[in-house]
Image (cartoon, grey):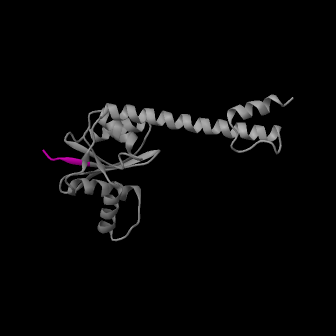
């Protein structure tokens, strides 16, 4: 049975795929949205090839949501670095022009030709750390927004009196003096 590589060029709203065999023959291609319906359609399309490996460009960046969905569905997923895909596209076409279809093709070609690409695995501890880190970043952004709003309010209520490095105690005292 032949082994199939599905090259994926992921974007925020859509993913373009190209299916290659081990001899780099194109067996299929498609463009799917990244919502649930598009993801389900992409999986149905790929079911035609039981021995398949997904090659996702930037599986820790733009391709991360799709790669995680595929991993949780039990698929084998490889991470293809964007630089490798760009080199293959440049050498295969002779020019640096980009399109989603060319990107998906070059990603699949990299996966066929290159041994030692990183095979992704579900890592629960890493996911928990990412969730905590994202939450901390969101809280930090919210705190900065609140401090900026407070600074703007103080500047409106007390023109010329509010400093940029006002502490919370100083801000409280200033607000108490406003009638």
Q: Quadrant of residue 67?
A: top left
54 is within the stretch colored magenta: no
Which residue is at a point 33% across and 71% down the rendered structure image?
94
Q: Quadrant of the N terminus?
A: top left
Q: Quadrant of residue 99?
A: bottom left
Position of residue 167 in the picture relative to residue 132 (left or right): right
Which secondary structure class fits the magenta region best?
A: loop
Q: Position of residue 89 (x, y in %)?
A: 33, 63
Query: Which residue, as the protein is rendered here, is positioned at the far bottom?
Result: 94
Q: Position of residue 164 (x, y in %)?
A: 71, 45
Q: Nearer the viewer, residue 94 or 86?
A: 86
Q: Position of residue 47 (x, y in %)?
A: 26, 38
Q: Quadrant of the C terminus?
A: top right
The number of discs equals 0
2 is within the stretch colored magenta: yes
Q: Nearer the viewer, residue 168 or 47?
A: 168
Magenta stretch?
1-5
Image height of 3 relative to 82, above or below: above
Position of residue 60 in the picture relative to residue 178 (left or right): left
Query: Which residue, as the protein is rendered here, is positioned at the far left?
Result: 1
Which residue is at a point 81% across and 40% down the rendered structure image?
156
Which residue is at a point 64% across and 38% down the rendered structure image?
145
Q: Position of residue 23 (x, y in %)?
A: 18, 56
């Amino acid at each position: 049975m032949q082994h199939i590589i599905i090259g994926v060029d992921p974007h925020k709203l859509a993913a373009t795929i190209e299916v290659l065999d081990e001899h780099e023959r194109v067996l299929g291609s498609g463009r799917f949205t990244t919502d649930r319906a598009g993801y389900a359609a992409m999986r149905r399309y790929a079911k035609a090839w039981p021995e398949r490996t997904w090659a996702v460009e930037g599986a820790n960046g733009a391709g991360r949501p799709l790669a995680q969905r595929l991993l949780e569905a039990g698929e084998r997923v490889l991470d293809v670095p964007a630089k490798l895909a760009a080199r293959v596209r440049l050498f295969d076409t002779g020019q640096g022009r980009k399109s989603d279809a060319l990107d998906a093709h070059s990603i699949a070609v990299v996966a066929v030709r290159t041994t030692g690409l990183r095979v992704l695995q579900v890592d629960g501890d890493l996911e928990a750390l990412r969730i905590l880190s994202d939450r901390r970043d969101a809280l930090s952004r919210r705190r900065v927004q609140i401090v900026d709003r407070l600074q703007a309010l103080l500047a409106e209520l007390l023109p010329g009196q509010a400093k940029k490095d006002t502490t919370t105690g100083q801000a409280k005292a200033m607000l108490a003096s406003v009638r």
